[in-house]
């Protein structure tokens, strides 16, 4: 302000306003801290009164944590401020339906930087935690999952009530052995305007070292949300269950941020397994059809199963690429509650979230998701989420907003956030206010995106994605010959051997042209089968049992120079 020539009196006035505002923020946060500490203590005491057995060591740890929270706040002077203030807006759009919210409303600023960064500060998940800990379960609220990626490499991973084993995984990709060549995207696809890009053979330079099978697994990065949803259901809190399921559905889009390279298109019969004991999940996927291109997946976690099949229809429109997802995802908990959400238009449920990549020719390339997602439950609640389409003058892009309805159509909770950052919720029928940069009261954090890796690559892979294609000698001995980790062009690309990768990619694409004839001759998937009632592919079982015995009879060597006919027949 001095550099701009403003007077000292005006500068002091501005400083006084800032001090006054920050003092009010501090006062409100202090009240919230005290309320949370009181609720923690009352919950703990009530458990003791109800006869819950707690040993002396657990009691000492619990009480020390309460004292630590008190000490941190009092000693820091201001604590660690959340990304929101708690001041309410006067413009209430709470009684409007989600579809009636105008895109021209003043944006809700979710990307405001934290005002202070105190090393002893408490995470925003604690600051914005549940008000009613008896009904929502504090144990599920105070776990800082943003550090899960770091914990994966440093020690035992804890997820709310479960302690998972520590697995050492890599933190970076291999250093490239060759210098990458620049290839103009426009020179490759200029003659394919309006065509389906899945039929266009692109050089390997436009790929990332992952297959579409592995990209499906990447949506399980925040599987702890499903673990949390399972625990809430066990406690009888169905509302918090669907809120966490909704956060999980949104979190799958976070990995798209900055990812401008396409994954490898799997070969027919190609598979991928992911065993993550530190996350408590086992994932498996297979390419079950070539035309149309379909990928089926199945994942098992603590108290839940997740499965679905998906396809991606792409169109190139000159300056942008439109990606329309096709498929249905199903989540089933052990207690019988089921949630489903579609990735396509399906009458009478016209819900679809479309991905568009912009500025392919000029400007900074970026992607955006827009559309509506309906999460349908077979029990008490359903959820509707709207991904707001970004406009040219939008100061706060990537917004997601929605609400939860009960069986009678009454709105019982509202959600809002950004698909690349975080999701928050508030209970009741009052929608979030949209013309204020600050949050309404009683908001709580559902999900926050993990921090980026310390060693980013040009592919902008997350810490979790970096581990997906890792291949150790011990693992290689157990994998079937169809696993994506054994694909030579993808492995060469990860190692930075671009010429070898491009040559192998062309060889496998020539071989892939045999896939249509294989399907016409009666080829069938090895590990999945289409459900005649739902029309979706379901896992038939047997993979992990075969892996334990290391018996891969009937699985073809799809990446070799020649494909043995009897292997294809037996795999059918």
Image (tube, helix red, strand yellow):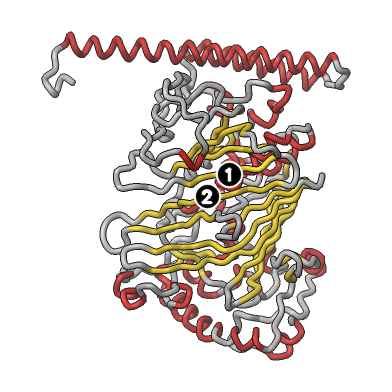
Q: Does 404 sit left or right of 531 as displayed?
A: left
Q: Secondary structure at mark 2?
A: strand
Q: The N terminus is located in which quarter?
A: top left
Q: Secondary structure at mark 1?
A: strand
Q: Is residue 183 above or below residue 564?
A: above
Residue at image location 64% in from the left, 29% down from the top: 141
Q: In the image, which disc is placed on residue 37?
A: none
Residue at image location 58% in from the left, 37% down from the top: 403
Q: Is residue 381 above or below residue 295?
A: above
Residue pointed to by mark 1: 384
Q: Earlier in the sequence, mark 2 or mark 1?
A: 2
Could you say where residue 315 lies in the image, as x and y percent from the top left? 42, 68
Occupied quadrant, residue 46: top right
C-alpha separation, residue under disc 2 versus residue under disc 1: 7 Å
Q: The C terminus is located in which quarter?
A: bottom right
Q: Check if mark 2's residue and mark 1's residue have beta carbons within 8 Å.
A: yes
Q: Nearer the viewer, residue 24 or 405?
A: 405
Callout 2: few (<14), some (14-19), or many (20+) C-alpha neighbours within 10 Å? Answer: many
Q: Nearer the viewer, residue 8 or 168?
A: 8
Residue pointed to by mark 2: 372
Callout 1: few (<14), some (14-19), or many (20+) C-alpha neighbours within 10 Å? Answer: many
Could you say where residue 516 lies in the image, as x and y percent from the top left? 59, 85
Q: Which residue is most to the bottom?
A: 565
Could you say where residue 178 lies in the image, as x and y percent from the top left? 39, 69
């Amino acid at each position: 302000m001095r550099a701009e020539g403003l007077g000292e009196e005006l500068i002091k006035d501005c400083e006084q306003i800032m001090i006054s505002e920050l003092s009010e923020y501090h006062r409100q946060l202090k009240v919230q801290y005290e309320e949370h500490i009181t609720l923690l203590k009352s919950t703990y005491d009530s458990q003791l009164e109800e006869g819950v057995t707690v040993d002396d060591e657990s009691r000492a740890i619990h009480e020390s944590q309460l004292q630590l929270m008190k000490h941190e706040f009092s000693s820091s002077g201001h604590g660690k401020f959340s990304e929101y203030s708690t001041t309410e807006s006067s413009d209430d759009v709470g009684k409007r339906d989600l579809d009636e919210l105008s895109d021209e409303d003043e944006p809700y600023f979710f990307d405001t930087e934290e005002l202070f960064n105190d090393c002893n500060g408490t995470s925003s998940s604690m600051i914005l935690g549940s008000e009613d800990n008896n009904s929502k379960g504090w144990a599920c609220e105070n776990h800082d999952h943003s550090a899960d990626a770091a914990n994966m490499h440093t020690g035992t991973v804890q997820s709310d009530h479960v302690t998972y084993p520590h697995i050492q995984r890599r933190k970076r990709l291999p250093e490239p052995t060759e210098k990458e060549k620049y290839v103009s995207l426009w020179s490759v696809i200029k003659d394919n305007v309006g065509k389906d890009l899945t039929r266009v053979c692109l050089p390997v330079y436009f790929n990332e070292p992952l297959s579409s099978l592995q990209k499906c697994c990447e949506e399980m990065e925040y599987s702890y949300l499903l673990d949390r949803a399972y625990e809430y259901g066990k406690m009888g809190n169905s509302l918090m269950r669907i809120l966490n399921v909704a956060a999980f559905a949104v979190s799958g889009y976070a990995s798209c941020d900055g990812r401008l390279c396409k994954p490898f298109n799997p070969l027919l019969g190609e598979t991928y397994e992911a065993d993550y004991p530190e996350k408590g999940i086992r994932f498996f996927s297979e390419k079950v059809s070539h035309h149309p291109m379909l990928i089926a997946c199945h994942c098992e976690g603590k108290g839940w199963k997740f499965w679905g099949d998906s396809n991606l229809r792409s169109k190139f429109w000159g300056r942008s690429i439109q990606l329309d997802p096709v498929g249905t995802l199903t989540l089933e908990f052990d207690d019988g509650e089921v949630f489903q959400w579609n990735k396509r238009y399906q009458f009478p449920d016209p819900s679809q979230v479309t991905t568009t990549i912009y500025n392919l020719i000029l400007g900074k390339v970026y992607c955006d998701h827009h559309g509506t997602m309906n999460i349908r439950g077979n029990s008490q609640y359903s959820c509707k989420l709207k991904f707001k389409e970004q406009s040219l003058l939008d100061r706060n892009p990537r917004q997601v907003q929605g609400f939860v309805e009960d069986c009678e159509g009454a709105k019982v909770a509202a959600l809002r956030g950004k698909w690349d950052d975080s999701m928050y919720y508030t209970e009741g029928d009052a929608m979030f206010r949209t013309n204020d940069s600050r949050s309404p009261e009683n908001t709580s954090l559902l999900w926050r995106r993990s921090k980026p890796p310390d060693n980013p690559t040009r592919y902008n892979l997350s810490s979790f994605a970096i581990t997906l294609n890792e291949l150790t000698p011990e693992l290689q001995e157990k994998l079937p010959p169809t696993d994506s980790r054994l694909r030579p062009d993808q492995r060469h690309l990860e190692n930075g051997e671009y010429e070898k990768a491009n040559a192998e990619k062309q060889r496998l694409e020539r071989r892939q042209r045999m896939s249509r004839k294989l399907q016409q001759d009666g080829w069938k998937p090895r590990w999945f089968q289409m459900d005649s009632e739902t029309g979706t592919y379901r896992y038939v079982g047997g993979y992990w049992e075969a892996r334990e015995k290391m018996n891969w009879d009937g699985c073809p060597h799809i990446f070799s120079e020649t494909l043995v006919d009897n292997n294809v027949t037996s795999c059918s």
